[in-house]
Amino acid sequence: MRQFSLVLWAIVFVSCWCPAGESVFPGEHWEHRDPADLGVDAAELEKLGAMLGGRGCVIKDGYVVHQWGDPSERSDWMSSAKPVLSTLLFFALKEGKIGSVDQPICEFYSELRGDDREITFRHLGSMNSGFRRVEGPGEAWAYNDPAIQLYQQTLFDKVFKEDPHTVAENTHRLGALGLEDGLQWREDTRRLKASVRDFARIVWFWNNQGQWRDQQLLPAGYFDEYMRPQTAKDLPRTEKGAETDDYLEIGTYGGGSDHFTKFGAGIYGFNWWFNETGRDHPDTRTWPYAPADTIMSIGFGGNCSAIFPEQNMILVCAKGDWGKLEAGNADSRMNQVLALAAGVVKEAEQPASRISVPKWEAVSIDFAGPAHKVTDNDPNPFLDYRLQMSFTSPNGKTHHVPGYFDGDGNSGLEGNVWRVKFAPGEVGEWTYQASFRKGAQIAISLDAEAGESASFDGAQGTFTVTDIPESAPGHYRFGRLDYVGEHYLKFVDGPYWLKGGTDSPEDFLAYEGFANTEKADHQYDNHLQDWREGDPDWNEGAGKRIIGALNYLASQQVNSIYFLPMNVGGDGDNARNVRS
């Protein structure tokens, strides 16, 4: 059965992305707007600026909604300048100065020796070139500043054959952005100095996929293809301490050939950082509480930028207190900064996507709410919040459906996704409204007014339900099972139903494919063959065997497997598939 989703934010990041809102572009100066006019919480913006310090700004839909510190002061953006190098690489590609990002750079830098002659531009932009390391190109991850030094020298001295200022501020390149204060470049490393308001123009250019006003300066397809992770999740880390000689005598962009961080495999590409799962955090995104499509440039000393494509918003801050990159750690300061930044947009005011679904198809509605881990106790996300959705049918009948905390919405154990699922049984226009309240043990309280209003409380929307298709299979055609006051349950649009299955609610779910399942006795290996293309799955194959087992049981005419979706307080110790 298909499932349709209405998502208020935290849309999953895919290879083809674009900013959600209507963008405008600055003229001679950035235009400022009242945050409320763009659905942004001014008080939360003040908190964000105070939390970061330094000098920064927030741009929403092309307008400055908050600014702190001196926006005109130029300073070194450190490693946040590395994606600028990749941006200039894309200009070289567009202009035919290089054949592809996979072109070996030895065709420009003939002095390279041995395995280094296999290094490509993609390797240099993805920190897996092996330059000054014992591994060959593409064989290992190393955050490698000598390789970035090689990158910038190749670009400026060998490809463009011009100084950085001339290359970057060409009116067909970054010069088209109308930089107010101009760019400066260090002589030895060509590292970038820029003001906050000018670096924000570059980040806004990235957010808009190479477009500036009415010009497509870089093909949008470059951003679809290259502004995503370029390193495999299983890429091993470089051998510790295994550095080779600087035979080119070019020095470094700043640090060593293996420094700053062990993270990168699965989350890094062309010098941007992405909110994906990686080698060292396979079950959790880089920043668990941030929207899944968040992209960052990260520079030493708190010189960073963040892009929130779905919200059409960027955050730029020089010398701010961003904290360290601790990928997958929900308690990290960087994760908290990004969560606060994403939360400045008033969620309830963001329109849900209007969709049309066939009758009895499942609709899943997601809200961005309080961020938690499943192990949190104060408050407990399963016990101390209550999400209740009211769905009103075309004839005016209201259905009350409980919702639940769903981690990151993708099997992760921490995040800020709150989800409601509902199968509508009437054709026409439906409306819904969320009630979201917080209080001690409110989830098991029957008092509608218990606790206090929280987060997206009151959010509402609509969707349309169409006739059930002629090809609808099995139970789906008959709809919901109802108690009708007789011995058997009955389908709303079909016959009576006689149960054939098990009454052991926890045992079937004692499956090793569910994260943190105690006493996970079932592997269902024999039923991998019963999984079919298009069936549900999660964590790259973890769901296939239990879904295959369900397919097998259905083929044997079993029509009921009891599930226990919430066991706060416990229901026996056979298996605990859900954190209590």
Image (cartoon, rainbow, N blue to C red):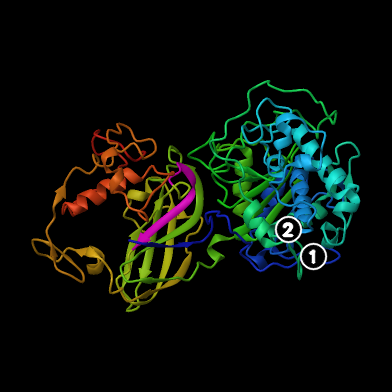
Please tell me which residue is depicted at 82% across the width and 61% down the height of the picture: 177
Point out the image quarter for the C terminus: top left
Q: Residue 26 carries which label?
A: 1
Q: Residue 243, image x and y in percent?
A: 72, 23
Q: Is residue 162 above or below residue 18?
A: above
Q: How far apart are marks 1 and 2 (CA)?
A: 10 Å
Main secondary structure of the magenta stretch: strand
Does 509 sit left or right of 195 as displayed?
left
Residue at (80% x, 62% y) in the render: 30
Residue lying furthest left in this view? Answer: 487
Q: Is residue 319 visible?
A: no
Quarter placement of the N terminus: bottom left
Is residue 365 rendered to the left or right of residue 89?
left
Whether pointer 1 and pointer 2 mark residues with C-beta atoms closer than 8 Å, the reply is: yes
User: Tag 2: residue type?
Assistant: Trp
What residue is disc 2 on?
Answer: 204
> How far across and how far down the image is residue 455, in percent?
51, 55
As drawn, is 541 to the left or to the right of 274? left
Please tell me which residue is depicted at 32% across the width and 41% down the height of the picture: 568
The earlier-in-sequence mark between 1 and 2 is 1
